Image: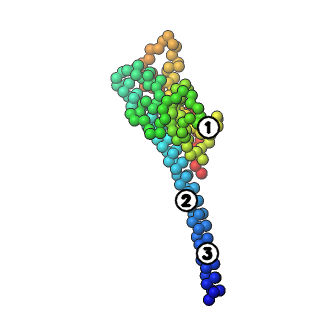
Amino acid sequence: MGLRHAQTGGSKLFEFIFVVLLVGVLSMVVLGYMLHYIEVAEKSAMESAVVNLQSSLRMRLAEVLVQNNVADGVRLAKDNPMNWLYEKPSNYAGEFSDPEPDSIAKGNWYYDRRKRELVYLVDMGKEFVPDKAGMKRVRYRVSAPFLQEAPKEKRQFSVNDVVGGISLVLVEGYVWEFK
């Protein structure tokens, strides 16, 4: 009886270790998938914020056109794009002048007043390729060619100049590919 009891106890220990290892491996696989989908969600949220900004710009330009208000259009071209929104996203950190790289938490937007850029700092970024400066970020700028093309002494713009000449553009393309 003693020998049989020892063999049963040993096989139960082996089964327990096997189950623990199996659960551990499955947990790692599930965790890998979860992290992947969290990063996909981050990319989608970032791109959704950009779509909201572009839609807000179109709405503001429509107001400029309807009201025939060139001055508001010119102000729009010089403004922080987050000010176009009626409600800023919860991950908008604010306006800064050339902030230190680690002073703003990852996963947040901020506006750099000096560079006039709207910047998103990538949080997860396992599948994100860093920019030329080696940073994981996406940068946008308001493009208003009519402001640069007109001589300073001749700053008379029409509503058509303003409405057709303001857009939100990428400063540098980014690569965020999922395998």
Q: Circles 3 and 2: CB distance less than 8 Å?
A: no
C-alpha gap between disc 1 and disc 2: 29 Å
Is residue 168 visible in the rendered structure shown here?
A: no
Q: Amino acid at mark 2?
A: Val
The residue wearing badge 1 is 135
Q: Amino acid at mark 1?
A: Met
Q: Is residue 13 above or below residue 120?
A: below
**Circle nearer the viewer, 1 or 3:** 3
Q: Residue furthest top?
A: 153
**Circle nearer the viewer, 3 or 2:** 3
Tell me the colour scheme of the image.
rainbow
Residue at the spot 58% in from the left edge and 32% down from the top edge: 100
Residue at the spot 40% in from the left edge and 27% down from the top edge: 61
| Mark 3 nearby-residue class (10 Å; few <14, some 14–19, many ≥20) | few
Mark sitting on residue 34: none
From the viewer's perspective, tell me whether residue 48 is left or right of residue 3: left
Q: Which of pointers 3 and 2 lies earlier in the amino acid sequence?
A: 3
The residue wearing badge 3 is 13
Numbered disc 2: secondary structure:
helix
Is residue 37 visible in the rendered structure shown here?
A: yes
The residue wearing badge 2 is 30
Q: Where is the N terminus found, in terms of image quarters?
A: bottom right
